[in-house]
Every structure is written in C-alpha cells, then in structure tokens.
Image: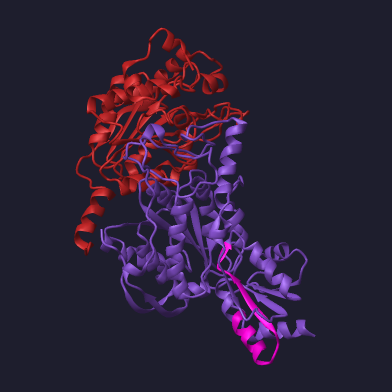
C-alpha cells in the first residue's frame, strides 16, 4: 500500500532501518503517544548498535502491543493478554545471549498480568520492559484501568472511578527490578537514555511512560480530543524527582513523580544465577 | 548438552517415567507449578534438567508456566509442562497460543477427582473433553496420548514430543493419578534404540519461507524457525496470515482455521493407535483408557476364564478419537461396556458416536477416588450377559 510518506519520500531513517515497511503506517490513532515512545526506543536501538539478529521485540495485548507487534524487522513475539512477562521469561531463559525489548500496557502489566510482572521483577529477569501508560483501556474503547485517576469518568465508571491508581514503578522497586524509571512521552531523550541503560543493565529494567491517548482518555476523562491538551494535562500532574525535593508535602500531594527511581548494577538476576547453577550441576 | 538418556531398569512411578521420557526425547525446558498428583514429575525435572544443561523453572502460576514453555519452544527448545485438575483449567488459557501459532510442546495432565479441587491425591478421568475442547475459540485439532503403565508413560511421552514436532502443535499426555503414582518396572533402552524426531528447520531463505503454511493446510513436518535464526518470525494471539501478521479478513480466518484442523485430520492413519485383545471371537467388548484399562483388561480375562466371549479395546491415542477402529469393534460385537472414572460419561459418548448404532453401548462410570476393581467390572459384564 502506498502511503503519503512513501509518495513524499518522508520515511524516517530509523523507521527505514528498523521497522518493516510493509507494516507502515502503524495502527495508532492520530495524536497517540505510542509513536513517540517507539521513536525513542529506536534511537536507543540505533545508538546501542542492536541488530535484528540479536534483539527480539516482545509484546502483550493492548494498544502498546497491537501497534508495535510485527513492526520490528527482527523477531516479534506477542503474548496473550497479561502474559508478556511469562513469555519473556521463556524466551530469555532459552536464549540468554539475546536482547529482549518488551512492550506492555497498564492493563496488560498492572491488571491481568500483575502477578507475572511482580515475579519477573522478583526474579530480576534480564529484559527491558517499556510500559505504555495511557491511564485507560484504549483498544477496547475507554474502560477504566488500574492506572486511571480517582474520579475519572470512563465507559465503565460512568459515575467516576472510586479506586486509587496503581503506582507500578513503586511495585517494580519493591519487587526487585534492577532499573526503574518513569517519563512522559515528551521526554524523548530521557526515554532513549533509559532504554539504553535498561538494555545494558543486568536484571529487569522497567521504564514507564505516561502517554497521551486523545481518543479515549482525552474523550472520556478530560473531555477533549486534542492531543496537546492531554499532554498538557500529563505535564500538570507530574513533577520530576529532583523538583519534588523542593516542594512541601502539601504541594507534592497528588503529583506523579518522574525520573529515575532506581539503578542498581549489583543485583544478580535469574539468568546469571541459572548459568552458575548449570556450571555446578551440569554433568556432561 | 548430553543425550539425557539413562539406559537401565528402574523401579519408579509413572510421574518419574514421564520426566525420563521427556529428557530422552530431548526436552530441555520445563516450567511448572506444584500440584498433586503431578509434582513428582516437576521434582524429577528439577533434579535432572540442570544435569543435562536444560532449564527448569517453577513459575508463579499455571498460566505463566504454559506461556513460558510455549515461548521456550519459540526460542528453539523442546519444552514441557504438567498439571492436574484445576491447574489444567488455567493452562487451557495458554494452550490457545500454542495451538494458534503451531508451537510444538507437550502438556501432561495427571487427572484427579474433580470438579474444582476435588480430591487432589486420588484418581479420576474427567478431562477427556477438557483437553480436546477446553481451548476457547475452537478451530483446533488436538492430539492426546494416554498411557496405562509406567513403561508407557515413558514411551508415550517420547511419542508426544515426536508428534508435536511432526504436526507442529501442542500434544497432551493424558494420564491419571493411578498411572502417575504406580511404582513398577521401567526399562530405558539405549539411546540408539529410541526414535527421536528433531525440530524441522527451513531449507529455504527467509523471503521464501511461510511461517504458517495457510495455502497448504495438510502439510506436516513444516519447519519451525526460532528466534535469532534470521527468519524474523512473528508469533501473536491474533488470526494471522502466512507471515504471522494480524488480520481481520474472513478468508484469512478461514484458511488459518482449516490449517489448524486439517493438518491433523488429513493424517489419521498416522494418529490411530489402539490396543485390541481377545477380540477375534468376541461377542461383547470392554472399552477403557489410561489407568482404568488395567482393571478392565483384568475383568475381561476373568470373563474369558468363565467362558464368556469378551474382548478388550483401548484407545492409546485418544485424540483424534479412533472412530474407524471403534466402528470395527461395534460391527463385531453385540454389546460394548465402556469403563471410565467419571459419572457424566465422556469416553462412552465417543464410543457411542463412533459405533454408529452397530452395537449397544453401556456406561460403567465412577466418580473416582478409587480406580475400578476388576471384580466390579466383571460383575457388570455378567449383568450385561443375562
């Protein structure tokens, strides 16, 4: 299929190098933040010199996954809803020599796959997981997510959400991941740097990106379909870890922190430990 | 990595024989979750797999373990998981991913009394339909083998792995607590005597290779390249075209569904394995499978000792169901007694369907906990003879 980009020869060099031309244009809605995160990820891939031969993209189910699946020129393994970490475990333990960049969403990782998320962090599985947090179930049409704000009106909370949102970075830290960071979709360079650190860090890297979903989050929660309004709203909700230090507890109340929460380089993960176990017990 | 075959004579449980069969077949990845009466296999795999350079993981739940082995198979490993009763219910969620992406791996179901948790430590046979039809969405043609002894637990586990490679699909070893926990002689032959099917790998370059052969639905021994082999494979939960790209088109769904079913149904000759005993002059037949086949055969021998013309029939490959072989039995005898450890009647329905009214079919079921006794089946036979 010929696209406007094709006609005008406007294919981004990173897309031309790393994504499947036949899978473009991808299926993200106009104004969606997923494209920005994929762009930042490709910057990291390029700067690290990763190749289709040594790197696999892994997905779950939801916008995060349906949009990124089968776009990477190398191997793409897309799991059932919530099972991304279980699938990543089987892949990484079978091929410890390969890199796994894993895409998941707030429903995939925080709700239906919560248990696998916790245990992948506990095992400190050596993969790089990028959480696309849009605060809502986008693919299914705007239902409440475990990350939706308190009071949010969605298609399944017509009277407002009565549950507090899930801070998944705190969970990743508590459960034992090696690297944990949170950014906004506009923190382009920071996301790319985090992905690079994630790939280079032994153990689980968990990178959450708060991103705009004008189609559903904007429409139902913020009553706007303007992506810029949603981005602005995300910026208003967030404060960097550094800036937060200067704020009073009253000023910090209700703010979402962003930045690097944790970067430990000395916590061995299951991949390393299994190699050690094999050294001791392999007989032949 | 070593061969994993430990030739010799052993006095072990069926569950342990499954582990040795898996290792002999080349299984180098196991993920499980503890559940009675299957944990002995997990424990044996945990001891043995590191010895041969394989991976053994205890996952956080049943779902994780089946997805983990499916992914390991995508990464090139021969892989297995095991469960029972409520664990199998959960595993069915992941089974669909394996079926749809045509991933070769083995799932073992050590059946126990149900429904729900039932009686964890005791036998029943309630999962015949569960393994066949449990994966939501249909459009699957499952293969399941059922052993009656420790030796068969070993032999048929190897066969499960071989069939998984040939048909590129998940294969069930459908066993039960009686077989799993029966300690008896296991003879492991030399490696050279075992027939092991290796993973089929593409012989054409990536641009000429179809990951999913939708245009040739009946083809078997279709190659399965793994990650890192340069084929840019695409595996997903969605209806896919031959490259693995998600599609919502009706013709793609139609082709994919036919592929998943026809690859098995077009090769029933390779998938028919039954045991017939004393059937030549039989006027009545006893049909049973798995662990319950042993008291059933004993009952037939008791009947023969009293001059009753009874034969014994057992499906070894239970799925696809051996319709043709059952019909032959039905055409020969007047009455068929189907013994199984459930009250709702599962095997009996298949026998009834396959008999096409050629013989009267009777059900002798039990809710499980205890296996049938030969004397119970014999008494039922005598009642039928009147």
Q: Give above or below for A35 relative to B298.
A: above
Residue A249 in view: no
Start and end of the magenta stretch?
B296-318
Image quarter of the N terminus of chain B: bottom left
Q: Is residue A67 left or right of residue B116?
A: left
Q: Give above or below for B167 relative to B122.
A: above
Residue A41 in view: yes
Please name whichever residue, A271 or B247, is drawn nearer the observer in this view of the structure.
B247
Image quarter of the C terminus of chain B: bottom right
Classify residue B187 by image quadrant.
Answer: bottom left
Looking at the picture, the colour scheme in use is by chain
Residue at x-position 46% and y-position 67%: B156
Position of residue B144 measured from the top left corner of the image (x, y, whole percent)? 54, 60
Provide the letter of the chain coloured red. Answer: A
Residue at x-position 54% and y-position 36%: B239
Position of residue B336 measured from the top left corner of the image (x, y, whole percent)? 72, 74
């Amino acid at each position: 299929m010929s696209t406007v980009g094709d006609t005008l020869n406007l294919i981004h060099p990173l897309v031309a190098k790393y994504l499947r031309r036949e899978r473009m244009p991808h299926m993200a809605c106009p104004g969606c933040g997923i494209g920005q995160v994929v762009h930042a990820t490709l910057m990291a891939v390029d700067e690290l010199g990763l190749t289709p031969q040594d790197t696999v993209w892994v997905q779950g189910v939801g916008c995060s996954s349906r949009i990124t699946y089968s776009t990477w020129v190398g191997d793409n393994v897309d799991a059932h809803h919530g099972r991304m970490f279980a699938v990543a475990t089987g892949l990484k333990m079978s091929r410890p020599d390969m890199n796994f960049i894993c895409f998941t969403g707030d429903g995939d990782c925080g709700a239906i796959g919560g248990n696998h998320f916790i245990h992948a962090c506990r095992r400190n599985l050596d993969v790089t997981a990028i959480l696309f947090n849009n605060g809502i179930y986008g693919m299914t049409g705007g239902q409440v997510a475990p990350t939706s704000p308190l009071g949010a009106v969605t298609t399944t909370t017509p009277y407002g959400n009565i549950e507090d949102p899930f801070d998944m970075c705190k969970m990743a830290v508590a459960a034992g991941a090696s690297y944990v960071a949170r950014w906004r979709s506009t923190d382009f360079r920071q996301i790319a740097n985090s992905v690079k650190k994630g790939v280079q860090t032994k153990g689980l890297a968990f990178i959450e990106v708060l991103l705009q979903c004008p189609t559903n989050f904007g429409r139902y929660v913020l009553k706007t379909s303007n992506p810029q309004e949603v981005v602005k709203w995300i910026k208003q909700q967030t404060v960097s870890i550094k800036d937060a230090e200067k704020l009073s507890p009253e000023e910090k109340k209700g703010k979402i922190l962003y930045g690097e929460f944790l970067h430990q380089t000395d916590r061995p993960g299951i991949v390393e430990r299994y190699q050690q176990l094999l050294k001791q017990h392999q007989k032949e | 990595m070593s061969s994993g075959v430990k030739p010799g004579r052993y006095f072990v449980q069926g569950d342990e024989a499954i582990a040795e069969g898996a290792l002999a077949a080349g299984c180098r990845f196991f993920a499980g979750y503890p559940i009675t009466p299957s944990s002995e296999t997990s424990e044996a795999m945990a001891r043995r797999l590191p010895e041969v350079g394989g991976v053994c993981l205890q996952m956080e739940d049943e779902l994780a373990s089946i997805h983990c082995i499916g992914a390991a198979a995508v990464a090139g490993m021969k892989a297995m998981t095991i469960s029972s009763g409520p664990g199998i219910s959960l595993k069915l969620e992941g089974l669909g991913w394996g079926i749809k992406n045509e991933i070769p791996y083995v799932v073992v179901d050590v059946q126990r009394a149900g429904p729900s948790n039932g009686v964890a430590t005791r036998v029943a046979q309630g999962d015949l339909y569960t393994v066949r039809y449990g994966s939501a969405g249909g459009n699957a043609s499952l293969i399941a083998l059922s052993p009656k002894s420790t030796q068969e637990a070993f032999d048929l586990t190897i066969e499960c792995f071989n069939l998984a490679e040939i048909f590129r699909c998940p294969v069930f070893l459908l066993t039960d607590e009686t077989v799993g926990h029966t300690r008896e002689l296991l003879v492991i032959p030399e490696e050279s005597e075992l027939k092991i099917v290796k993973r089929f790998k593409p012989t054409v370059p990536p641009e000429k290779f179809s990951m999913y052969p939708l245009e040739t639905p009946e083809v078997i021994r279709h190659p399965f390249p793994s990650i890192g082999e340069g084929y840019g494979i695409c595996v997903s939960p969605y209806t896919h075209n031959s490259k693995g790209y998600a599609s919502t088109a009706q013709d793609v769904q139609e082709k994919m569904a036919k592929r998943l079913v026809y690859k098995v149904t077009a090769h029933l000759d390779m998938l028919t394995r039954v045991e017939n005993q004393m059937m030549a002059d039989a006027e009545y037949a006893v049909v049973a499978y798995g662990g319950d086949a042993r008291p059933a055969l004993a009952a037939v021998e008791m009947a023969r000792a009293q001059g009753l013309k009874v034969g014994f029939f057992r499906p070894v490959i239970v799925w696809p169901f051996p319709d043709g072989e059952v019909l032959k039995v039905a055409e020969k005898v007047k009455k068929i007694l189907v013994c199984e450890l459930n009250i709702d009647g599962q095997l009996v329905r298949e026998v009834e369907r396959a008999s096409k009214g050629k013989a009267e079919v009777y059900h002798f079921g039990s809710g499980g906990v205890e296996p049938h006794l030969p004397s119970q089946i014999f008494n039922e036979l005598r009642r039928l003879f009147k």
